[in-house]
Amino acid sequence: MKSTIAPAPSRLIGPLTIAILLGLPPLLRASATDDRIESAAQSSYVFKTFLSHDQILAKSLDGVVTLTGMVETQANSQLAQATIASLPDVVRVDNQLRTKEDSPRERSDGWLAIKVKSVLLFHRNVSARETKVSAKEGIVTLRGEATSLAQSELSAEYALDVDGVKEVMNEMTIAKTPAQQGERIDDMIDDASITAQVKSALLWHLSTSSVKTNVATQDGTVTVSGIAKNDAERSLVTKLATDINGVIMVINEMTIAP
């Protein structure tokens, strides 16, 4: 399925703009920019972390990026597209990615379990990699070890808010000893990957899936704009975005619908 996501506006002067100011030949400018886009895509946090097992080729021509190859699920396809669209100087994304024939069909239990797992992976205050997710007839079961009761409850809260989940059975255990402080990855996450994670999380969370939200990231600071139904919905967008991997601060410029 082909779809198009318009790239988020960049506040920085990109290489293409600099090349124009330096008076470089048009073909050289375009080639350098396309090479940089392709390199940035493959080195992005999303591609190296969430899409590392997928076969994705990103080819840029004059800022129009064509995605071809095979991915595990449609959710991975959407995530790849959102990441590319958020890169500087990307004009448009032509998504030609295919999903594997044996991938779970949409709305199936397998599909739902993958979606819940993906949502948990976006959020840094839950232990997604230590959480086992299964689903049966829309009822999701969480197993594994959480570092605290608060983390266990937050995992269940996020899982319950995924579209299609009817109920969550939280069977996670609590670690007897505090977890060791691991390496902080926030400084290694690029802005395009942060934007893609925030967009995907807001789309996949049932409470914010219909919110008309624009997302832009600069140096880890996320700015969200658009229209919220009420103050509670606006606050929820801030809460979810703040807990995304790599986010340093959230500036919420959303307005309330009349």
Image (cartoon, helix red, strand yellow):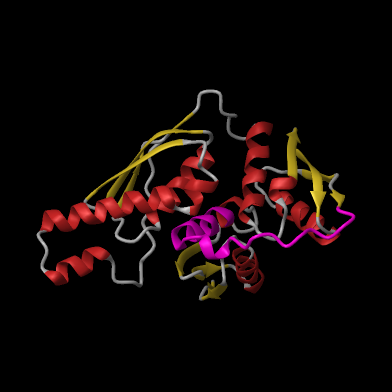
Asked if the magenta segment contains residue 188, the reply would be yes
Q: Position of residue 33 (x, y in %)?
A: 25, 56
Furthest residue toward top: 101
Question: In this picture, is 233 found above or below 63?
Answer: below
Can see residue 23? yes
Q: Position of residue 136 (x, y in %)?
A: 76, 32
Q: Residue at x 54, y 65 (%)?
A: 187
* Horizontal arrangement in the rendering, residue 63 relative to residue 144 (left or right): left
Range of residues picked out in magenta: 175-201
Furthest residue toward right: 176
**Quarter of the image where one finds residue 102:** top right
* Horizontal arrangement in the rendering, residue 199 relative to residue 69 (left or right): right
- Front residue of this view, candidates 228 and 58: 58
Q: Quadrant of the N terminus?
A: top left
Q: Position of residue 216 (x, y in %)?
A: 45, 66
Asked if the magenta segment contains residue 136, the reply would be no
Q: Residue at x 22, y 63 (%)?
A: 16
- Front residue of this view, candidates 121 and 214: 121
Q: Position of residue 26 (x, y in %)?
A: 11, 58
Q: Residue at x 50, y 53 (%)?
A: 45
* Horizontal arrangement in the rendering, residue 117 relative to residue 41 (left or right): right
Q: Residue at x 84, y 47 (%)?
A: 172
* Horizontal arrangement in the rendering, residue 121 relative to residue 27 (left or right): right
Q: Quadrant of the C terminus?
A: bottom right
Can see residue 5? no
Total labels drawn: 0
